[in-house]
Image (cartoon, rainbow, N blue to C red):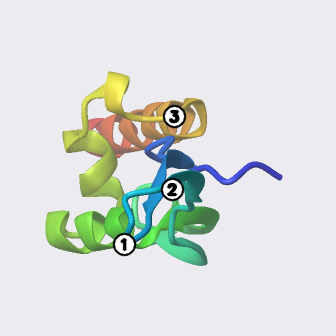
Amino acid sequence: MSRKCDLTDTGVQTGNNVSHSMRKTRRRFLPNLQKVHLQSDALEQKVALRITAATLRSIDHNGGLDQFLVTAKANNLSETGRKLRIKVKKALAAKEAA
């Protein structure tokens, strides 16, 4: 299982540990991934995702999973996020038509 966010594709970054003597050794910065179940009002079901804490804050800031996916740009989302975005948009369009 890769260490990537299911929605934003945020992954592992690399950098240096720098000691007091300025000696540099390579290290990895791992994303803060959380397993969450988010309610999608448009799809009327819960969606299980593995997302970063920063993405979770963004979802709360935008007013929920559906609103986050609709307002996010497609090129900022992962493949899973894009597929979920399309499903949400179709469900919202179907509700508007009905």
Quarter holding the C terminus is: top left
Q: Residue at horizontal 35%, vertical 22%?
A: 75
Q: Residue at horizontal 36%, vertical 62%?
A: 55
User: Vertically, is 60 above or below 23?
Assistant: below
Residue receiving disc 2: 43
**In the picture provided, is 74 more to the left or to the right than 28?**
left
Residue 38 x/y as whole percent: 50, 73
Q: What element carries label 2?
A: loop
Amino acid at dot 3? Ser
**In the picture provided, is 14 more to the left or to the right than 60?**
right
Residue receiving disc 3: 78
| Separation of residues labelled 3 and 1 (CA atoms) | 39 Å
**In the picture provided, is 51 more to the left or to the right than 63?**
right
Q: In the depicted view, which residue is nearer to us: 18 or 13?
A: 18
Q: Earlier in the sequence, mark 2 or mark 1?
A: 1
Of badges 3 and 2, the one in the foreground is 3
User: Vertically, is 80 above or below 55?
Assistant: above
Amino acid at dot 2? Leu
How many residues crowd mark 3 within 10 Å: few (<14), some (14–19), many (20+)? some
Of badges 2 and 1, the one in the foreground is 1
Residue 86 x/y as whole percent: 46, 31
How many residues crowd mark 2 within 10 Å: few (<14), some (14–19), many (20+)? some
Q: Residue at horizontal 51%, vertical 37%?
A: 87
Of all residues shown, which one is farthest toward the top? 75
Q: Earlier in the sequence, mark 3 or mark 2?
A: 2
Amino acid at dot 1? His
Residue receiving disc 1: 20
